[in-house]
Amino acid sequence: MLMRWSKLFIPTLRDAPADAEAASHKLLVRGGFIRQLHAGHYSLLPLGLRVHEKVAAIVREEMNEIGGQEFLLPAMHPAAIWKKSGRWEVMGDEMFRLVDRKGAETALGMTHEEIFTDLALEITSYKALPQIWYQIQTKFRDEPRPKSGLLRVREFAMKDSYSFDLDQAGLDSNFKLHHDAYVRIFDRLSLPAMPVEASSGAMGGSGSTEFMVPSPAGEDDVVRCTNCDYAANVERATSQLKAIDNRPIADLERFPTPGVRTIKELAKVEGGAGAIHQIKTLVMVLDGAITLALVRGDHQLNVQKLQDHTGAIDIRPATPEEALEHLGANPGSLGAVGVDNLRIIADPALEGRSGMATGANEDDWHYTGVDVARDITVTEWADLREVTAGEACSNCGEKLEIVRCIEAAHIFKLGTKYADALGATVLDPDGEERPLIMGSYGIGIGRAVAAAAETRHDDNGLIWPVSIAPYEAVVTIVSMKDDASVIAGEALYSELRSLGIDVLLDDRDARAGVKFADAELIGVPYRVTIGPKALAEGEVEFTPRASGETSRVALDAIASQLAETIIAAR
């Protein structure tokens, strides 16, 4: 197919949409890659689809390389299979749910663990294992706040793959295969994605790893060490805490605190204590049950850590009315001393602490001299606190930093969760039935496009890597009125095509400045400019998009030089 700019639909814009905040959103719209249909739903225009399909091709190649077999499963699922796995309720409002004309409940697939597991029922013997199955399919998630263009949408293409094994060793092997394949994928996409420890959330399983791309447009915080290779999502991160001496207050004492409602206020009153010597009591409702979560006064509760520890599906803070009903006081005067009828989960930073202060479960009263072991009936200990920047790395002791990131991929060790729920078993070498052990591995195609745009741009536009650029090179004819330039441009365009280069010919009857600006905006990696002045000397201008530095190259040498450069960069 001839790629002449004069014949293509590339609707570039001078200005970005007023509601666009992320750089990728602005530039993908301005460059004519995407258009919004309605909130969270985008049309891929020809340029956008070219980039999208090049990303998908790289993902597909790497999946095939590790033995993946490609499927294409339905996007609409019967409710029954989601109910059988227990996730119909777990997915909540993010699942698009429908009722067909016969009254049957269905859903648009958010992911495909259940559907692939249903197919795996046909695996009956360990001899057929291991298996790696994958697809690139549309997913639907009813995001409450879709934003940032392709970064957070309600309809998107995802590569999701699934491994099936007989034992944990097999799962570990397939998990590593996917991990390494993802490292290669992101390297080929020129994305600086770092693998980090992550929460498994509603997916379940024994562990997971996210691939995070540092960017201010992201929505996830990653804790990473400034010295070693430790990195974890803030929902999983841990750190070393400095040792704190207990206050020498042996006896539990109740004292008045009129009007005191906050940690800071309690630190200032007579008889109070600094935040590090306070117990913060958070009253939470976990699947309808009132639960107390205790952290040190200067720490914040990470709700995902609490959810991961308890396995709760529905989790929220209690209302003031609920707190009053169960503890006898309003927020600001709450505590766990003497409470023996509620589940109490405490962060390890409180273990062994004494001389502490906390609410007395009576408005305007607090306790001091609290000995956690003596005065509080802790049901269980769990890492609940959120790590903050500057704390010490658990591995090496150096300072931790927090980086905002885009989640580009997520891989999970699911174990037997779905096999148990759906009855997917195989016969082992001894003839015994055993549940399949599964892994799940996802990477968003559109989000990878957006992440590349987010991390590779300047004030003039996008800077695509060769591997996924809509075109690898553009031949720009400065003046369509100059016959020699047109003839040379057409010849070079044909020669580059014969060398296998994905090249665009800018043959528009437009000013040179407009052509240069558009080429920079859409991010073509290399531009060859053919103009009367240089051509008179047997030369053309060569401009790599990344550097913007223009040099002169002989006309009869540019094709082989450019082809060699592009092929090496693919």
Image: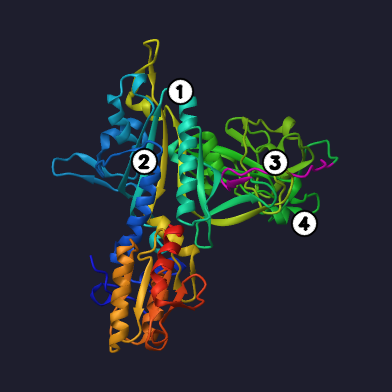
Q: Secondary structure at mark 3?
A: loop
Mark 1 and mark 3: Cα distance apart in space: 30 Å
Mark 3 and mark 4: Cα distance apart in space: 36 Å
Tag 3 and tag 4, C-beta contact below 8 Å: no
Please state the horizontal and vertical placement of residue 306, each as a whole percent of the image. 55, 40
Say whether residue 305 is left or right of residue 477.
right
Q: Earlier in the sequence, mark 2 or mark 3?
A: 2
From the image, tell me which residue sits under label 4.
268
Please state the horizontal and vertical placement of residue 387, each as a whole percent of the image. 64, 48
417 drawn magenta = no
Mark 4 and mark 1: Cα distance apart in space: 57 Å
Question: Which residue is rendered at x = 39% and y = 40% of the image?
Answer: 65
Q: Secondary structure at mark 1?
A: loop
Q: Nearer the viewer, residue 412 or 530?
A: 530
Label number found at residue 167: 1
Tag 2 and tag 3, C-beta contact below 8 Å: no
For label 1, the crowd category at 10 Å Cα-Cα, with few meaning under 14, some 14 to 19 and many 20 or more, is some
Mark 4 and mark 2: Cα distance apart in space: 64 Å
Say whether residue 60 is left or right of residue 389.
left
Q: Earlier in the sequence, mark 2 or mark 1?
A: 2
For label 2, the crowd category at 10 Å Cα-Cα, with few meaning under 14, some 14 to 19 and many 20 or more, is some
Q: Quadrant of residue 560?
A: bottom left
Please identify the quadrant where the N terminus is shown. bottom left
Label number found at residue 395: 3
Q: Image height check: is 324 above or below 263?
A: above
From the image, tell me which residue sits under label 2.
64
